[in-house]
Amino acid sequence: MPEEKCFKELGCFRLGATFFHEIYRPFNFFPEEREHIDTRFVLYSRENAKRGELLKWSSTQEEVARLATFKASRPTKVLVHGWVDTVFFGAWLRKMTTAFLMVGDCNVIIVDWQGGNSLPYTQATANTRVVGAEIALLVNKLEKAFGAKRDTFHILGHSLGAHVAGYAGERLPGLGRITGLDPADPYFQHMPREVRLDPTDARLVDVLHTDGASVFDIYKAEGLGMY
């Protein structure tokens, strides 16, 4: 097996000892192709609260610059679903979008990565690395096109989406905030910081635990956790 897998624009992804543990992460996979994961982004704002503007992983800098309703003067919320969830069945994504737009004037971007979040779980965990990189790339393009400031971005991820947010933040020093919503445990708990969401991935990292099944001590000790 090769030591790394490289993607245009996203760079190379390695496995190695960091992503392996004989108990907590015994099976390792490279992420699938970008075309298969097919990450998509849908932008909503108060001007287009019902019908968002669509971008794809393959959208060029010029296509990003043509977004009609993105405003760099607004804070930006980025919502990321988790394992076997989709924008079609994940009602929380639309409800949260509506709530954010009711409370304040902001950009809301829903991240759809349903092409890479299905069975087996082990492959989905690997694909989170690419999705996080795709989000970071989009933020870079928004910075270039509109002068957006990354400290105004707040990424919220559920389940595997929480770790997607962490991978994005790792590539975006100075990112404003990440909120992890019940971060997935299997293949992440007890692993090094590079593998999972951790308090260094943004200026503020907060985690909401609602399942009560397990607790990430790292957030209790170094970040802000609510249980």
Image (cartoon, grey):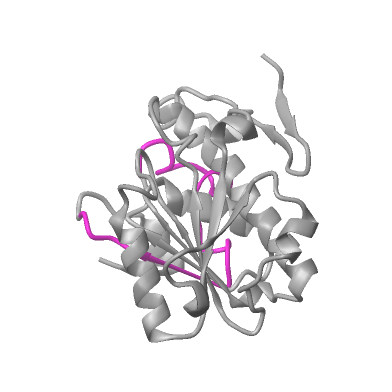
Instruction: Name the residue nearer the viewer: 225 or 217.
Output: 225
In terms of image quadrants, where is residue 24? top left
Image location (x, y in percent) of residue 111: 50, 53
Q: Residue at x 44, y 54 (%)?
A: 162
- Left or right: 5 as drawn, with respect to 49: right
Image location (x, y in percent) of residue 106: 52, 79
Residue 210 sits above or below residue 193 on the image: below
Q: Is residue 35 magenta?
A: no
- Left or right: 226 as drawn, with respect to 27: left
Image location (x, y in percent) of residue 138: 67, 57
- Left or right: 185 as drawn, with respect to 161: left
Q: Is residue 193 magenta?
A: yes
Instruction: Name the residue nearer the viewer: 105 or 220.
Output: 105
Q: Residue furthest left?
A: 212
Please give the range of residues in magenta.
Answer: 185-211
Q: Residue at x 30, y 47 (%)?
A: 89
Residue 75 visible at all: yes
